[in-house]
Amino acid sequence: MKIAVLVSGGGTNLQAIIDSIDNGHLTNVSIEVVIASNANAFALERAKNHGIASLVITRKAYETMEAYDEAMLGAITSSGAELVVMAGFLSLLGPKVVQKYANRILNIHPALIPSFCGKGMYGIRPHEAVLARGVKVSGATVHLVNEFYDEGPILLQKAVDVLPNDTPETLQKRIMKECEQVILPQAIQCMADNKVVIENNLAKIVD
Ligand code: GAR
């Protein structure tokens, strides 16, 4: 399955996908393009180092959401991608992309949805909120993307304990390594193997 990976930052999730393809844990998947929401994303270096085509599409380069949406749609469709993977992508996708790739867009969120998600909950913020609330487990969620923030069908989740001495940074690091980088490649494999059935905003993995 051909995929487009959308990034905004360090690209550790992108790296996990690249490594899973290289070491044979992720099969029948090829990254056709990496699209970054800003030119400084280190994820672009990772794409370059692996000979993967990349481009930058920033929201602010376009006067309207419609124009941005069209540009993003054009870039994704011309790559030939059948699946879009938001791997730490912090911009909002426009309605045309979301409709054209309905049930074909994955997002990784650094918390256990429906907790600590929604508008403004990205990057380090969910981890700060988790510690402020004193919850004892957190983790990551891969879900399908619809037009509402973090509300599409949940595909996979993985949890870790929140430890007494955790800081937002230590918790973030552990969740990235032990949850995100594990379940994102797994979710892509499920999609590539055509094992995901979606009904009534619920995703089921079938054999
Ligand atoms: C990851 O923790 C990802 O879950 C989060 O941004 C980070 C990107 O890291 N995404 C969100 O907060 C989306 N709401 P990476 O660039 O190293 O993969």
Image (spheres, rainbow, N blue to C red):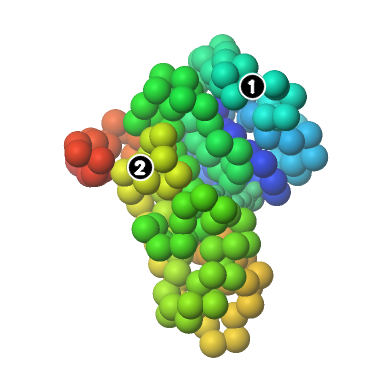
Q: Is mark 1 within 8 Å of ligand 1?
A: no
Residue 152 position (above or below residue 58): below
Work out which residue is located at the far right of the displayed protein and give it. 40
For the residues carrying marks 2 and 1, which lies nearer the camera in this image? 1
The answer to whether mark 2 and mark 1 are in CB contact below 8 A is no
Above or below for 32 versus 156: above
Q: Which residue is at the far front?
A: 64
Q: Which residue is mark 2?
A: 152
Residue 64 has which mark? 1
Residue occupying image coordinates x 54% and y 77%: 131
Image quadrant assignment for residue 65: top right
**Residue 12 picture location, percent across and down:** 63, 50
Marks 2 and 1, Cα distance to the nearest angstrom? 25 Å
For residue 72, the mark is none
Answer with left or right where residue 204 lies relative to residue 56: left
Is 55 situated above or below 207?
above
The one nearer the camera, 149 or 85, is: 149
Q: Residues within 10 Å of mark 1 (few under 14, many from 20)?
A: few
Could you tell me the amino acid type at mark 2? Gly
Tell me which corner region of the image, top left, top right, bottom left or bottom right, holds residue 148. top left
Could you tell me residue 117's position as x and y percent?
Answer: 46, 56
**Camera sees residue 93:** yes
Q: Earlier in the sequence, mark 2 or mark 1?
A: 1
State the residue at coordinates (61%, 43%): 90
